[in-house]
Image (cartoon, rainbow, N blue to C red):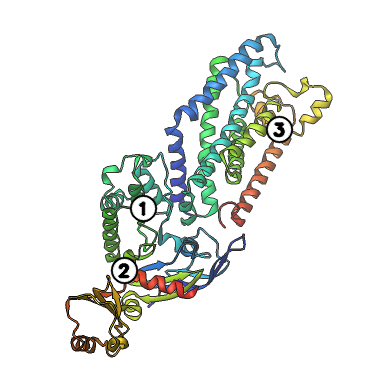
Amino acid sequence: MQHVISVSNLSKTYASGFQALRNVNLEIRRGEIFALLGPNGAGKTTLISIICGIVNPSEGVVLADGHDIITEYRAARSRIGLVPQELTTDAFETVWATVSFSRGLFGKPANPGHIEKVLRDLSLWDKKDSKIMTLSGGMKRRVLIAKALSHEPQILFLDEPTAGVDVELRRDMWGVVRALRETGVTIILTTHYIEEAEQMADRIGVISKGEIILVEEKAELMRKLGRKQLTLQLQSPLDHVPAELAAYRLELAAEGSELVYSYDTQGERTGITALLKDLNAAGIRFKDLQTKQSSLEEIFVSLVRERR
Amino acid sequence: MNFRAVRAIYLFEMARTWRTLLQSIVSPVISTSLYFVVFGAAIGSRISEIDGVSYGAFIVPGLIMLMLLTQSISNASFGIYFPRFTGTIYELLSAPVSYFEIVLGYVGAAATKSIILGLIILATAGLFVPLEIAHPFWMLFFLLLTAATFSLFGFIIGIWAEGFEKLQLVPLLIVTPLTFLGGSFYSIDMLPPFWQTVTLFNPVVYLISGFRWSFYGIADVSIGASLAMTMLFLGICLAVVGWIFKTGYRLKS
């Protein structure tokens, strides 16, 4: 299968000497939602900016739908829509005018029907004749998305799409993004909200200090790195873990009223059966139990920390 | 060639003009009319004819040039500076457009606007003084060439400027003085010999002289020199714009 975006040996050193990207290799599959995670300054925006043509690469090759982004920039860029991180909008133009402008700029013939659909999908239709400067931040974000979708791109970059957007709007946007994926659009998003990646992404890439340190199916990543915790709520608190249970490396929590057991879901035996039997033998009774999978956020933090 | 993009940029810029009609068109027309009243009527009545042309009529080409230069520069520089300032330039850089198309859209719109202004001022002048245009084709040619050249120059300033202050710097400190001293209001024959020579280093002299020749058939310098100088400046501006886009100066890191 041909990849919709393929980045090979991409490096970027800014004039200041700062190396934002180091030998990045990345392939994005057609039709997937790919989440790029990384701390501030990791190179997420630089990577996106290079692919979209806003920043010149220092080294390396990027193909978008098989077209080199530099030698065949017209073919490459006309397939790409970009929603930038900053709320950079016109001020005095109307929503309709600015979205129609974007379509023209990307060389597509005027199509009021499509613009109307985009605006309706983003709940912007009521605002189509409003000047952009009169809109709220969340609405401006939607205008940026509408501009990016105006020219029917096959690849959509969303750089921190829901930063500074309230919860309700965020869920709306996830809905929009999912609907887009249904139509075959490949979506690459960067985010700080791990929840967002966890909810939406098919695959996840982690970038740190200009290097891609991991690319994995989300489910696989969760499985591979995910540890589970079993929490037992005790009937009567303990002041220490009994010696005969030391092998389980249990931890006491909630002032001795909870016992926490961590285990690897990948292991042959999770040891739960044995633990429960031994607890029973030690006369420790519990009134409730729950298990919890570590979130992507915890995985992410531990990954980035490991590299330091 | 992405004609739709050129059209989109052009119409976007022209829409900005119509939206700010008062500032874009009415105010330059009023200020030019004031020049007519003050220089043409009040002072002009005390100045005899210059080369057989009444003083009021003599200053018309210079005044149109003054407006053409300042308006071309300010339109084009603002047009490209504003997206840089707000950050919306990202869209232009990520769009499938060539640099030539970007320049064509912005410079075309800025030049169109200043040509419209020039023609309005010409019509307004017709209300104050009797006008004759000896070489209408050349008049339009100079109008077009100057508008295009100085819109290009404005585009360069708009890319170079890092703040609104710098945006005003060149038009205010260089272009306006050069135009006033370039024979808008006088024939350079009236100057002492030394200053006549100095004036020949002022490029605007050639623009105004050529333009005035197209009206009345009189010129301070030869029409060939006027054309050559205008073309030279156009060539320099084109080269600088080419360099800007080749290196990504102030646009792309």
Using the rendered view, name the quadrant where residue A215 is placed. Answer: bottom left
Q: Of circles 3 and 2, which is in front?
A: 2
Q: Is residue B94 above or below residue B153?
A: below
Question: What residue is shown with label 3?
Answer: B206
Look at label 1 and name its amino acid. Answer: Gly
In this rendered view, identify the residue nearer to me: B241 or A279: A279
**Mark 1 and mark 2: span between their CA atoms?**
19 Å
Relative placement, left or right, of B218 versus B122 is right
Q: Is residue A68 above or below residue B84?
A: below
Q: Are marks 1 and 2 on the same chain?
A: yes
Question: To which chain does the residue with label 3 belong?
Answer: B
Look at label 2 and name its amino acid. Answer: Glu
Q: Earlier in the sequence, mark 1 or mark 2?
A: 1
Residue sitting at the far top: B46
Q: Which mark is residue A164?
A: 1
Residue sitting at the far right: B194
